[in-house]
Image (cartoon, rainbow, N blue to C red):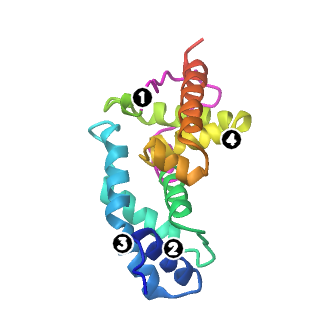
Amino acid sequence: MQEMTGSERITLWLNQARAGDAHARDQLFTAVHEHLRRMATDVFRRERVDHTLEPNALVSELYLRLFRDEAQSFCDRAHFFAVAAQTMRRILIDHARAGVAVKRGGSKQRVSLSSVDAWTRGAGPEEFLALDVALSKLAELDARAARVVELRFFGGLQEDEVAEVLNISTITVKRDWKTARAWLSSYLRPE
C-alpha cells in the first residue's frame, strides 16, 4: 500500500472531521497549525508594531471560528487554506472595527499595494478597514481578482499556491494580482 502524502492526509482528516470525528479534527489542526501560524506571522509583518492582536491569538481565534460550526465543510487542503485566509481577514477586520470608530461617509484612505510587503508597520486600523471596503467593491466587479488579493495579502499564499486554491494557472494569478493592485490603488487614492 502506498503511503499518503501530507496533502492527502489532510484531506482525509478534513473528511473525517466533517463526519464528526473529533480526533481527526485535532490531528488536522496539529498538522496545519504551523502553516497557519506562518500565515498569521506574515500578516503581522505588514501590521503596525503596536498591534494588540498577536499571531498565536489570531490562529486560536481562527481555530475557534473554523471548527465551532460542526457543519463547516472543506473539500480538500487547498479549500481549507482558502477558507482559513478568508477567516483571518474577517478576524482582522473585526478587530480593526472594534478598535476604531469609523465615520460613515468619511474620506477614502490611501493604501499602497505595490507588493504584498507594501503594507507597512505604520498602517493603522483605518487603512485596514479602507482596504476591506475596497476589496469588497472589487469583489463586486471581479470576484476572482478579489480572491487573489485576499489569498496573497491575508493568507500569505504564493502565486502557485493561489493558483492551486483557485484552480487557475499561475499566469492568470499574476494577471489578476496586477489588475487588482491597479484597481485598488485607483480606488484608495484620495480624490
Whether residue 144 is visible to the viewer of this picture, yes or no, is yes
The dot on residue 11 is 2
Q: CA distance from mark 1 to mark 4?
A: 20 Å
- The residue shown at (61%, 72%) is 73
* 58 left or right, relative to 130: left
Earlier in the chain: of badge 4 and badge 3, it is 3
Q: What residue would you read off at disc 1?
A: 115
Secondary structure under the numbered disc 2 in the rendered image:
helix
Q: State which region is magenta.
A: 90-115
Q: Quadrant of the N terminus?
A: bottom left
Whether residue 96 is visible to the viewer of this picture, yes or no, is no
Q: What residue would you read off at disc 3?
A: 31
Specify the principal SS of the magenta part. Answer: loop
Residues under numbered marks 3 and 1 in contact, where contact means CB atoms less than 8 Å apart: no
- The residue shown at (47%, 32%) is 126
Instruction: Look at label 3 and name its amino acid.
Output: Ala
Q: Of 188 and 39, which appears nearest the observer? A: 39
Q: Callout 1 environment at 10 Å: few (<14), some (14 to 19), or many (20+)?
A: few
Residues under numbered marks 1 and 2 in contact, where contact means CB atoms less than 8 Å apart: no
Earlier in the chain: of badge 4 and badge 2, it is 2
User: Where residue 47 sits: x, y (%)?
Assistant: 35, 38
Q: What residue would you read off at disc 4?
A: 143
